[in-house]
Image (cartoon, grey):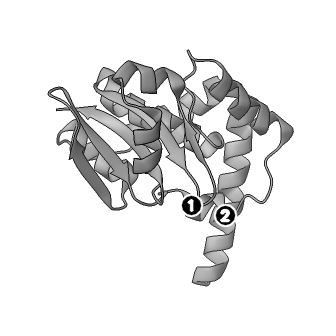
Amino acid sequence: MGEIQQDLVLKKYFKAFLECAVKFKMAGLREMAKVLASSINNQGSIWDKLKEIDYTETEVKPYNDEYNLVIVKNCPFLYLKQAITEWSDEAKKITENYNRFPEAGGGAFDPICIIHRLTRQEIAGKNIIQLGCASKDDIILSDKEINKLGIEKSKAEELLKGNACLYALKK
């Protein structure tokens, strides 16, 4: 099988797997995140594990005595997102609910963002505050997490402009 053909097959099956997880609602997305987090072979620090799941260029900026801000320059899942031309109504509803209810988290564009965020949470636990995501045209922030860290929304938006993800990680 040629490389292009393999690529199409991977994207097709990933979408099917993701839609299956969506049918199980947030529990399915959480399970996917647990599987992703446990698949990381890196036995290093939390930071080493997060770099593996984010696997694109990151920039770390000191924020305060307790946290550094981490800016993920490019969406590590953009390649997969491009395979999904339209989300199912169920997937849209899960994302909407995730962003609407503070206890869920917020700050995600789609189920892939949710899985990425939940995977980071699995890895870092209470050591991470996930502030938001950005696309080419939009920025979405988690009000709950913005308030928890105490960062100004405008500052978070400025840091996200032209980037993909923003989170705070305990030093």
Image side of residue 141 versus residue 14, left or right:
left
Look at 50% across and 20% down and name the residue there. 144
> Residue 157 placed where, x, y %?
47, 44
Question: Dot 1: within a 10 Å radius of its alpha carbon, few (fewer than 14), some, or many (20 or more) residues?
Answer: few
Q: Name the amino acid type tagged 2.
A: Gln
Rounded to the nearest angstrom, the CA distance separating label 2 from label 1 is: 6 Å
Q: Is residue 108 above or below residue 58?
A: above
Toward the viewer: 166 or 161? 161
Residue designated by label 2: 82
Residue 68 image-quadrant placement: top left
> Residue 16 placed where, x, y %?
73, 50
> Residue 90 placed where, x, y %?
81, 34
**Can residue 109 be seen in this snapshot?**
yes
Residue designated by label 1: 78
Residue most extreme to the bottom: 2
Question: Dot 2: within a 10 Å radius of its alpha carbon, few (fewer than 14), some, or many (20 or more) residues?
Answer: few
Quadrant of the image containing the N terminus: bottom right
Toward the viewer: 123 or 74? 74
Look at 31% across and 56% down and name the residue there. 58
Helix or strand or loop: what does disc 1 sit on?
helix
Helix or strand or loop: what does disc 2 sit on?
loop
Residue 73 image-quadrant placement: bottom left
Look at 62% across and 23% down and name the residue there. 27
Q: Is residue 25 above or below residue 74?
A: above
Label at residue 137:
none
Look at 37% across and 28% down and name the residue there. 129
Q: Name the amino acid type tagged 1.
A: Leu
**Can residue 1 be seen in this snapshot?**
no
Residue most extreme to the right: 89
Q: Are marks 2 and 1 in contact (CB under 8 Å)?
A: yes
Image side of residue 49 versus residue 122, left or right:
left
